[in-house]
Amino acid sequence: MVEKHNKTFNLKNGKTFASIKQLAVHLKGMSEDVYTHHVNKHKNDFANWSKFSMKNEKLAKSIEGHISKIEMELNVLRELVHNTTKTKITTKKNKTNKKK
């Protein structure tokens, strides 16, 4: 469940997270029971949290629907790698521009 106007996600087991990186960490050790409570044929809490709380529509789109836990983990990790690579490229460009 996502708290209104907050980026914190509360898992069924009482654990919380507030970033995509933390989602990836929690997914790795998450029981199937907790996962299927949040992702099933009726809802996908992680996709909703990504879209509405984290404002990351790209990730939300890649994890929407009733997908397996391993698919969820892979798509979240892909997003983390993409963001890390994008950040490194931007940082290098900024450093190059400052030298000019």
Image (cartoon, rainbow, N blue to C red):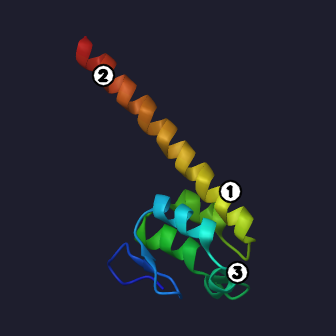
> What's the CA distance linking mark 3 and mark 2?
45 Å
Circle 1 residue: 74
Q: Residues within 10 Å of mark 1 (few under 14, many from 20)?
A: some
Query: Viewed as shown, does residue 5 lie left or right of 55?
Result: left
Q: Looking at the picture, tell me which residue is in the foreground, 25 or 74.
A: 25
Task: Tell me the amino acid under the disc marked 1.
Answer: Leu
Q: Position of residue 62 (x, y in %)?
A: 65, 61
Assess whether mark 2 and mark 3 are in contact (beta carbons under 8 angstroms): no
Circle 2: is it few (<14), some (14-19), or many (20+) Cα within 10 Å?
few
29 and 98: which is toward the camera:
29
Q: Mark 3: give few (<14), some (14-19) or many (20+) Cα within 10 Å.
A: few
Residue appearing at x 73%, y 64% in the figure: 70
Say whether residue 36 is left or right of residue 47.
Answer: right
Q: Which mark is residue 8?
A: none
Give residue 78's position: percent from left, percent from top. Answer: 62, 50
CA distance separating discs 2 and 1: 32 Å
The image shows a total of numbered marks equal to 3
Amino acid type assigned to the residue bearing label 3 in the image: Glu
Nearer the observer, 40 or 12: 12
Which corner quadrant holds the C terminus?
top left
Disc 2 secondary structure class: helix
Q: Residue most toward the front? A: 29
Where is residue 16, by image quadrant? Answer: bottom left
Determine which residue is flagged by label 2: 95
Image coordinates for residue 32, horizontal then vertical, percent: 70, 80
Q: Which mark is residue 32?
A: 3
Q: Nearer the viewer, mark 3 or mark 2?
A: 3
Query: Quick one: label 2 or label 1, which is nearer the N terminus?
Result: 1
